[in-house]
Image (cartoon, rainbow, N blue to C red):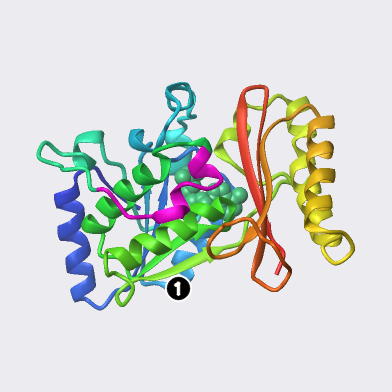
């Protein structure tokens, strides 16, 4: 695996590889890698001539400074894991390679997508996500971009970013399934901050989502949400939302005649977790 720390060197290298006919599969991450991330790298490896992972803890997407400060950093282990799965290139930029001196923060027209759900609870978060992904895609001439369904709203936001930046004809977006722990908890870098007891309680998130899916045809959407809130609160979660939403717009669903996704955001012991399940 080749490690690049500067945008210029990486860009030059990738342009050469492209001239040689290699297709590039790109997986952006913030590190503290787990099997969820590695599933995306495997996919990028299998479907492209060259796989590239970036690790950059993007300050502009953290609305909560404490979350940024506590974000886990495990770079040595990350490198070992990337080598073990056969990742070809790692981009490990410092802040000034992404947000260089004359960098002008763009404003992306995300509409309601940045107002609902995560957008409401994390103001500015999706603008930060778009800034970093837009900048990374300036540097990396990717053919395929791999994201995890785990961050469903982020996937919808990036889909919109690709339309806004007119990249859809050159770049294919793949949304890969959520990889879970044995107890159903969606893998997340933030899980490292949970105690074993909290990790056990956190299985309530996926269980509640599976409950919604199993009962979709049996109960009204309102009842499903009310029962879900009770389930989560009884496990000691501080709940931001349990929502059943339109799978494209993420607006609250009003009927079963639309693509549907159930989403949860909740904190335990000060660690905020999100998860979702596609219902139809
Ligand atoms: P992050 O490092 O949290 O920014 O995540 C980098 C990428 O990995 C994003 O596209 C995430 O959606 C994806 N990802 C995170 N957790 C999982 C998971 N459990 N299963 C699949 N993909 C994931």
- Residue nearer the viewer, 109 or 155: 109
User: Badge 1: few (under 14), some or many (20 or more) residues near its Cα, within 10 Å?
Assistant: some
Q: Is mark 1 within 8 Å of ligand 1?
A: no
Tell me residue 254's x, y (percent).
69, 62
- Asked if residue 119 lies left or right of residue 268, the reply is left
Residue at the farthest front position: 254
Residue depicted at 66% across the width and 60% down the height? 253
Give residue 70's position: percent from left, percent from top. Answer: 49, 23
Is 79 in front, or is 260?
260
In the image, residue 116 above or below residue 162: above
Say left or right for 36 vs 146: right
Q: Residue at x 31, y 77 (%)?
A: 169
Q: Quick check: can you spot residue 33?
A: no
Q: Is residue 57 above or below residue 195?
A: below
- Which type of secondary structure does the marked residue at label 1 adopt? helix
Count up the numbered dots.
1
Q: Which residues are magenta?
A: 107-120
Q: Which quarter of the image is occupied by the C terminus?
A: bottom right
Report whether 79 appears left or right of 180: left
Please name the residue that numbered disc 1 is placed on. 47
Q: Position of residue 3 (x, y in %)?
A: 29, 47
Q: Residue furthest left?
A: 102
Residue at 79%, 36% (x, y): give it. Answer: 232
Residue 238: percent from left, percent from top? 70, 28
Q: Is residue 96 magenta?
A: no
């Amino acid at each position: 695996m080749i490690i690049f720390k500067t945008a210029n060197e990486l860009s030059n290298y990738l342009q050469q590889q492209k001239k040689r006919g290699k297709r590039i599969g790109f997986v952006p991450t913030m590190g503290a890698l787990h099997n969820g991330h590695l599933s995306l790298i495997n996919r990028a490896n299998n479907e492209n001539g060259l796989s590239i992972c970036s690790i950059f803890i993007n300050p502009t997407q953290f609305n909560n400074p404490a979350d940024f400060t506590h974000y886990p950093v495990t770079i040595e282990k990350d490198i070992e894991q990337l080598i073990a799965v056969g990742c070809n290139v790692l981009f490990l930029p410092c802040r000034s390679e992404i947000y260089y001196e004359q960098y002008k923060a763009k404003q992306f027209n995300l509409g309601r997508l940045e107002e609902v759900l995560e957008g409401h609870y994390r103001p500015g978060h999706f603008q930060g996500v778009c800034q970093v992904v837009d900048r990374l895609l300036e540097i990396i001439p990717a053919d395929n971009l791999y994201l995890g369904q785990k961050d469903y709203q982020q996937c919808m936001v990036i889909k919109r970013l690709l339309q806004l930046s007119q990249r859809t004809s050159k770049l294919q977006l793949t949304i890969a399934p959520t990889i879970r722990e044995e107890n159903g908890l969606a893998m997340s870098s933030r899980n490292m901050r949970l105690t074993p007891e909290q990790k056990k309680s956190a299985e309530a998130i996926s269980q509640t989502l599976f409950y919604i899916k199993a009962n979709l045809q049996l109960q009204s959407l309102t009842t499903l949400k009310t029962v879900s809130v009770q389930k989560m609160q009884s496990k000691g979660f501080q709940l931001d939302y349990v929502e059943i939403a339109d799978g494209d717009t993420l607006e609250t669903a009003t009927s079963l005649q639309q693509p549907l996704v159930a989403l949860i955001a909740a904190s335990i012991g000060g660690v905020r977790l999100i998860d979702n399940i596609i219902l139809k």
